[in-house]
Image: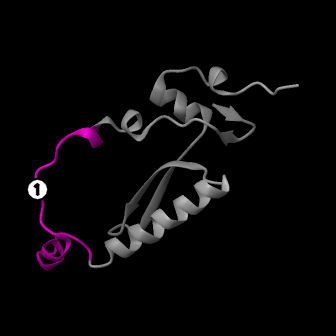
């Protein structure tokens, strides 16, 4: 639910992206993927920095995103903002039901 612009109860990642539960075939190690030119040698550093920033913002209560997509080839970072409309599309719950009523 949302109070003002703050999302208080975001759907679980498995609700947002059910495919993350699918078993994926074993892949190469990071070193093997870099050697085969299948993975950027800096992706782990980029993801580490991104995860740290997300966790910092979650702890501070200032994280506006529910998903982030990083594409080093294109040089882009695309966020999915945690808004009532976006959460509604994912869950089927009307946006008006996602917004908490202020307590008096």
In this view, 92 is above or below 17: above
- Residue at (59% x, 54% y) in the render: 58
Q: Quadrant of the C terminus?
A: top right
**Percent from the top left, x then y, of residue 80?**
50, 47
Q: Quadrant of the N terminus?
A: top right
- Residue at (47% x, 56% y) in the render: 78
Label 1: element kind:
loop
Which residue does the numbered mark 1 point to in the structure image?
A: 26
In this view, 33 is above or below 7: below
**Residue 35 painted magenta:** yes
- Residue at (55% x, 50% y) in the render: 65
Q: Nearer the viewer, residue 26 or 92?
A: 26
Residue range of the region highlighted in magenta in the rendering: 19-40
Q: Nearer the viewer, residue 52 or 89?
A: 52
**Percent from the top left, x then y, of residue 13?**
41, 41
**Quarter of image, res 4:** top right
């Amino acid at each position: 639910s949302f109070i003002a612009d703050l999302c208080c109860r975001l759907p679980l990642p498995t609700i947002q992206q059910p495919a993350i539960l699918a078993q994926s075939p074993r892949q190469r190690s990071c070193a093997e993927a870099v050697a085969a030119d299948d993975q950027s040698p800096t992706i782990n550093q980029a993801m580490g920095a991104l995860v740290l920033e997300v966790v910092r913002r979650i702890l501070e209560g200032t994280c506006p995103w529910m998903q982030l997509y990083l594409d080093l080839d294109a040089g882009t970072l695309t966020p999915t903002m945690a808004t009532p409309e976006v959460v509604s599309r994912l869950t089927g719950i009307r946006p008006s039901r996602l917004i908490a009523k202020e307590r008096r």
